[in-house]
Amino acid sequence: MTENLHRICVSIARKTVAEAVSAATAVGSLADVIEIRLDALTQMAVAPFISQIPQPLLFTNRPTWEGGGFNGTEAERLSPLIEAAGSGCHFVDLELKAPSSSHQAMLAALEKSASRLILSWHNFQETPTINELVGRLSMMQDLGADIAKIVTMAATAQDVRRMLLLQDQAEAMGMPLIAFCMGRLGVISRVATLELGGFMSYCAVNDEEATAPGQLSAATLRRIESLMSGKEPCH
């Protein structure tokens, strides 16, 4: 199996481009990928990030109906994502629940781009049955995702185990998968997924800037990795 170089994605949600670039610079040595949350910006832009951040970039413009901050029109939301794809960024994120017209427009933009499409689905209330989770995964594959992202809220340990089991199905389908649970119980899945074949896990710039419940800081996740690999002694 080819080594996955996109293991740890640091999510940056700052109000200005300058603040976001500064945060990316500060955390760059800990990140395999930098996610720019366009929906957090007061004035949206793509080009400054492309030119100033050397790490692989993921652009996300999360709408309010999927837990994000963007509340404009769908055309306005999609425009910077299409620009990012045209600029050759590594990844763009589009919600599974986005209108079919958005899916078609993004796929058309990606035909002439090296960018890879992450189709995402978030459930902030619960972790559904394994059948529903597999159904979402299959929908993402059918809609042309390069990478699937499924993130749910964990209320029980069974929820976490069910989410991690989804990796087996994704492997059988040949679909790279980002999958973990939110919330306190879900924290362990953010670490475990990296050792169980998951494509990527997300973390925050620091402990105060988590963009989702249970999200660890980049420094904490890297330290856990170091402990697990034996590079840092456990006490």
Image: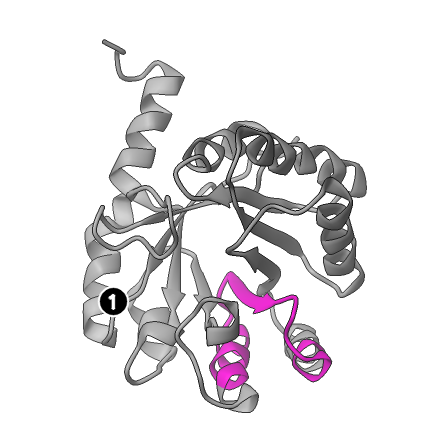
**Residue beneath the point at 80% across and 61% down:** 142
**Color encoding of the figure:** one colour
Q: Is residue 156 above or below residue 58?
A: above
Q: Is residue 106 left or right of residue 12?
A: right
Location of the C terminus by quadrant is top left
| Label 1 CA crowd tier, 10 Å (few <14, some 14–19, many 20+) | many
**Residue beneath the point at 66% across and 45% down:** 176
Give, as a single range, the part of the protein colored magenta. 77-103
Q: Is residue 29 above or below residue 36?
A: above
Q: Is residue 105 left or right of residue 87?
A: right
Location of the N terminus by quadrant is top right
**Residue beneath the point at 35% across and 57% down:** 211
Q: Position of residue 86 (x, y in %)?
A: 54, 78
Q: Give 88 or 154, whichever is nearer the viewer.
A: 154
Q: Is residue 8 above or below residue 16?
A: above
Helix or strand or loop: what does disc 1 sit on? helix
Magenta span has 127?
Answer: no
Please tell me in which quadrant of the rendered image residue 102 appears.
bottom right
Q: Is residue 177 left or right of residue 208?
A: right
Amino acid type of the residue that numbered disc 1 sits on in the rendered structure: Ala
Q: Position of residue 48 (x, y in %)?
A: 31, 76
Magenta span has 83?
Answer: yes
* Residue at mark 1: 20
Q: Is residue 80 left or right of residue 222?
A: right
Q: Would residue 61 be seen by someone viewing this image from the given angle? A: yes
Q: Would residue 200 be seen by someone viewing this image from the given angle? A: no
Q: Position of residue 200 (x, y in %)?
A: 51, 44
Q: Give 167 or 184, whichever is nearer the viewer.
A: 184
Q: Give 76 or 122, whichever is nearer the viewer.
A: 122
Q: Position of residue 192 (x, y in %)?
A: 50, 29
